[in-house]
Image (tube, rainbow, N blue to C red):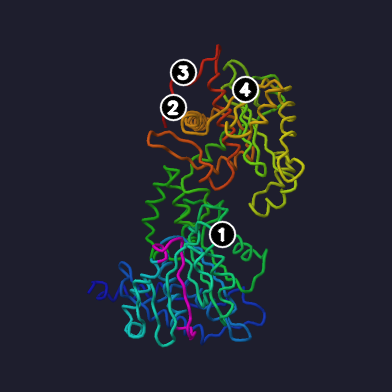
Amino acid sequence: MRFLFYCPILQKEAAKLRRLKKYKPTRFMANGSKYDKHTADNAVAFINCLKHTKGEWYGLPFDLIDWQEQIIRDVFGILKPNSCRQFNTAYVEIPKKQGKSELAAAVALLLTCGDFEHGGEVYGCASDRQQASIVFDVAVDMVEQCPALKSRIKPVLSQKRLVYKPLGSFYQVLSAEAYTKHGLNVHGVVFDELHAQPNRNLYDVMLHGSGDARKQPLFFLITTAGTDRNSICWEVHQKAEDILQGRKVDPTFYPVIYGAAEDEDWTSEKVWKKANPSLGITVNIEKLRVACENAKHNPAEENLFRQLRLNQWVKQSVRWMPMEKWDRCAIPVDAESLRGRTCYGGLDLSSTTDITAFVLVFPPLSPHKTSFCGDPEDYGDKYCILPFFWIPEDNLDLRVRRDHVPYDIWKQQGYLQTTEGNVVHYGFIEAFIEELGAKYNIREIAFDRWGAVQMTQNLEGLGFTVVPFGQGFKDMSPPTKELMKLTLEEKIAHGGHPVLRWMMDNIFIRTDPAGNIKPDKEKSTERIDGAVALIMALDRALRNQGVAGASVYDERGILII
């Protein structure tokens, strides 16, 4: 027996910290619905009879923390006029280490044993069977510590199933292979870590139509924020945000999001307390302080801290470009003052329906001349950047709604152009580049050798020198590392272009065993076409830098970061 069992002080303190002092029904209770205290009390009492299964709390009664009890009373206690639950979907998004797995396990057992549903089918779902087993294993430990449940539940561990014999209901783990899940008669689903789902297949199968034959099915989704804004979890997250902000109304959907806003100071302990409702109970603030200090000095740690500890949807698990450094290079760039200047282009066509990017890089002038980047007091030691972007006109509104990116505003502001039709019109872009060639001395245009064959031939016909550029480590690593170095040294001027900034913030970097790096289009959660075009253009500028074509790589070798 653990020492904790003999520690009444700790037990008393834990109980004091975990109580909901006064319950107030959620503001999302629909007209006609009512709060049934008896039903809510039964749900809370069932969970309170369970015991904790982890760490120092092992064996203690599962007295719900205030935020947990609020959820349970709202979801199980608010009933429609027909006495069925108003909410059939609950979305709970919360940082790590808040007691998420134990709450999910308790809800699964409540649906299986305490909902009086004969033959009820309750499923635990996650990205894979191992992840789903985390909640299941917690449920098994809870059953083992509760004599009343242990005598009534038959575990079938080989199938990851708990059978509640009095009702013939069961709780079972499912893996992500959705094609095997049609035909289920679902009473409840506990979906753990929705953000880790590789696709939407399992979600669609389990939540769309599977509970139609049940009186009051419940889909309990509990997750931490993710990184992929094209995922099913981001879609559900956006719906929850829209309901919380009053932009949408869905009386069947119950949203709960604990986290820090994107513009809040992630180093503030006040923000930590807002994002972590179990701070001081299941989460030690000293551990957050240590993690925060590590994150301050490491961009990779920063993103993990913000995602896991503050529940923020970061761009990717490892942020490459420190955006505060990038923003310090937002020196105004006067396009007219650059007329006649030597420059190098990078062209990334992407696909015909996505963003096409063309970036010009102007190498620095002599330190004794002005840079013509807008400020006459600024000397010519910077690489000036002029980016251009195009998307199809017909897809503009759809992309704004789908991607939650302000393409329409960028178009109005002149940072983004559209071409007629539902695909990018390459002829329009060729004509635009030809016009740029009349204004600037475009020495070379780099392009992805695996695409844009016809367009590059057309550009050659217009008199441009086009250079194929590989997308592997060999070609991409030197200029990618150089771009970081120039950014940190504030040797570039990009004018704060919002589209390019967005793309720089989206970059995920892949590293090979030799330490070479390159942007990874597959793992980067959103568009990075402009960043890739910039890297290609910068490479040509660096290789041709100086009188007689002396390369910066020749002068000091390839930079190793």
The residue under label 4 is which amino acid type? Glu
Mark 2 and mark 3: Cα distance apart in space: 11 Å
Quadrant (top left/top right/bottom left/bottom right) for the C terminus: top left
Q: In this view, does 4 lie above or below 309?
A: below
121 inside magenta stretch: yes
Q: Position of residue 381 (x, y in %)?
A: 56, 22
Residue that mark 1 sits on? 232
Q: Where is residue 158 in the image (x, y as percent from the top left)?
A: 34, 71
Mark 2 and mark 1: Cα distance apart in space: 40 Å
Q: How crowded is mark 2: few (under 14 residues within 10 Å), some or many (20 or more)?
A: some
- Can you tell which of label 2 and label 1 is closer to the viewer? 1
Q: In this view, does 218 lie to the left or right of 101?
A: right
Residue that mark 3 sits on? 554
Q: Is residue 357 left or right of residue 549?
A: right
Disc with the residue nearer the chain's start (4 vs 2): 4
Q: Can residue 270 be seen in this view?
A: no
Mark number for residue 559? 2
Q: How crowded is mark 3: few (under 14 residues within 10 Å), some or many (20 or more)?
A: few
Mark 4 and mark 1: Cα distance apart in space: 42 Å
Q: Is residue 410 left or right of residue 469?
A: right
* Residue range (magenta): 114-132
The residue under label 1 is which amino acid type? Ile
Residue at the spot 39% in from the left edge and 70% down from the top edge: 136
Task: Kindly state the secondary structure of the residue where label 2 is placed.
Answer: loop
Task: Kindly state the secondary structure of the residue where label 3 is placed.
Answer: helix
Residue that mark 4 sits on? 444
